[in-house]
Amino acid sequence: MRRLLAVLAVLCAIPAVSMAEERWMTVLLDGRKVGSLQIDRQMESGKVVTWQVLDFRMTRSRTPLALRTELRSTESEAGAPLAFYASTRMSSQENLATGEVRDDGLFQVANTVGGQSKINLLIWPTGATLAEGQRLAMVARGFKPGTTYRLRNFDSVRQQVANVDVEVVGDEVVVMPDEQRETLHHLRESIANPGAGHAVDIWVDDNGFIRRSLAPLLGFRLEMAECSAACAQAPNQDIDLLRAAMISSPRPMVAALRVAPVRYTMTVRGGGPNPFIDTDEQVVRPIGDGVYIVDVGFAMRHGDEAGPLPEDTEPNAWVQSESPEVIALAKRAVGNAQTDLQRMRRLRSFLSDYIDAKGLDVGYASALETVATRKGDCTEHAVLLTAMARSLGIPARVVTGIVYAERLGGATRVFVPHAWTQAWIDNRWISFDSAQRRFDSSHIALGTGSGEPWRFFSAMNALNKIRIDRAMPGSNLMDMPAPSDASGPPPGGRGAP
């Protein structure tokens, strides 16, 4: 599993740590050290430059995975945005976003993903701030318990604004990693979107500099705490993200069970929003106390789901469906197929063999990068399959969820994080899975998106709360047609991600 760009959402909401030239924070997942965050803040000719560098290291099925993120913001002393820079490395290629204000007030923005660069103009969103502006806004609102307000934090990776609701919880004594006790202001931040559900707790000093933070990340508890450089750069501890994200299956999901509808009884521990979604192949019904009935099967609700959005047909920085390389590969795969269903089946079959190197060391690669490397796992399959479908005029989207694996990473009979593609065909969404070679009823959907990585990460935050209590044959619930993507044998012991 790879899903670490979610860390960026936390970083983008964290202003600089201190007026000092350099500060460090140690990064922990469920109490185990996995990285470091270095923060430099400098005053230069009336400008405030804040630089944050996150190094994050862990393993996936014993395969080392290293990710690096660099964020830089340039602002006036009053917090007005002047320039931003964001570099992320989740695969073999660096993904880069830069922006700088022009004399006319517009921002000229350049994005490079998968080796493909684009330049465009951005009208700066009203009230949106970068690191220094966010710090100044918190200080201006004060730290009286019960105070609430909203910030508009600009995410330089996506060039989007996150509306963040802030609540001042109160003053608390915090024990820092160096054992020093400090009295800090406890604030709770949450994205102001219906059903977002995940809060970030931060502890700041009187100047609004963050000294400690806690946030959910892929089902883990992500903690960052200020300490010395030696503390932050101490050796990391092994933590296998894939193994930690696995969910035990209540029974063996044999092939005969998986090709028919299945009814799952699922418990979401600790409350929170419903993590499951309704699709044309999945129906979710809450029955109280965090328990859900989830029915999964082919053509579960023919045509009930809404049709494609513009983002399901358009290229984006990660799903480069307008790229000549993607278009040529898609045309090569479909040949003389006459219908969209035939085209999707051929695309699925082609990609199952085209991506011929399992890439557990890949964090998240774009469609164009995967065309070149032919390497990856489930997300690379899903992103490239989605891009190829869109290049042929077939609306498509990436689905995030979990899938059954009989054996994976030393574990048996588990559900693991997974991604696949849905295409809009004959007025309904139909699933295709080139990583698994076919879609079956062991695919449980948690979210859909345009193929950008943060959509995947957001859906994964509920993993540590999900328990599968029962999985029963659902063939007696309704008459179901044959699977839509029935080519190839049912997946057996293959790894899912």
Image (cartoon, rainbow, N blue to C red):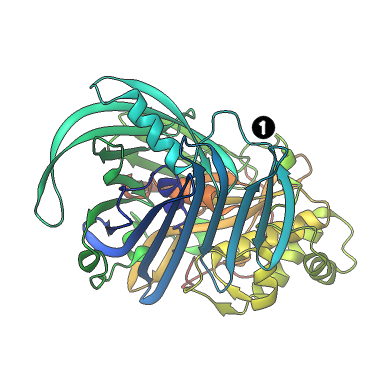
Q: Secondary structure at mark 1?
A: loop
Query: Which residue is found at the position 53% from the left and 40% from the top?
Result: 154
Q: Left or right: 350 with respect to 168?
A: right
Q: Left or right: 286 with respect to 465?
A: right
> What's the amino acid at mark 1?
Asp
- Res 428 seen here: no
Query: Which residue is found at the position 45% from the left and 60% from the top?
Result: 404
Q: Left or right: 471 with respect to 237?
A: right
Q: Label 1: which residue?
A: 304
Q: Position of residue 435 (x, y in %)?
A: 58, 67
Query: Which residue is found at the position 22% from the left and 33% from the top?
Result: 185
**Please, which residue is most extreme toward the front here?**
45
Q: Quadrant of residue 390?
A: bottom right
Q: Position of residue 409 (x, y in %)?
A: 37, 73
| Mark 1 burial class by Cα count in 10 Å: few <14, some 14-19, many 20+ | some
Q: In terms of depth relative to the viewer, which is nearer, 115 or 332?
A: 115
Q: In terms of depth relative to the viewer, which is nearer, 470 or 430?
A: 430
Q: Left or right: 133 with respect to 27?
A: right
Q: Position of residue 218 (x, y in %)?
A: 39, 52
Q: Position of residue 235 (x, y in %)?
A: 24, 73
Query: Which residue is found at the position 29% from the left and 67% from the top?
Result: 239
Which image quadrant: the N terminus? Answer: bottom left
Q: Quadrant of residue 264?
A: top left
Q: In terms of depth relative to the viewer, which is nearer, 466 or 7?
A: 7
- Res 430 seen here: yes
**Is 489 placed above or below 149 here?**
below
What is the total number of numbered labels drawn onto the structure image? 1
Q: Quadrant of residue 434?
A: bottom right
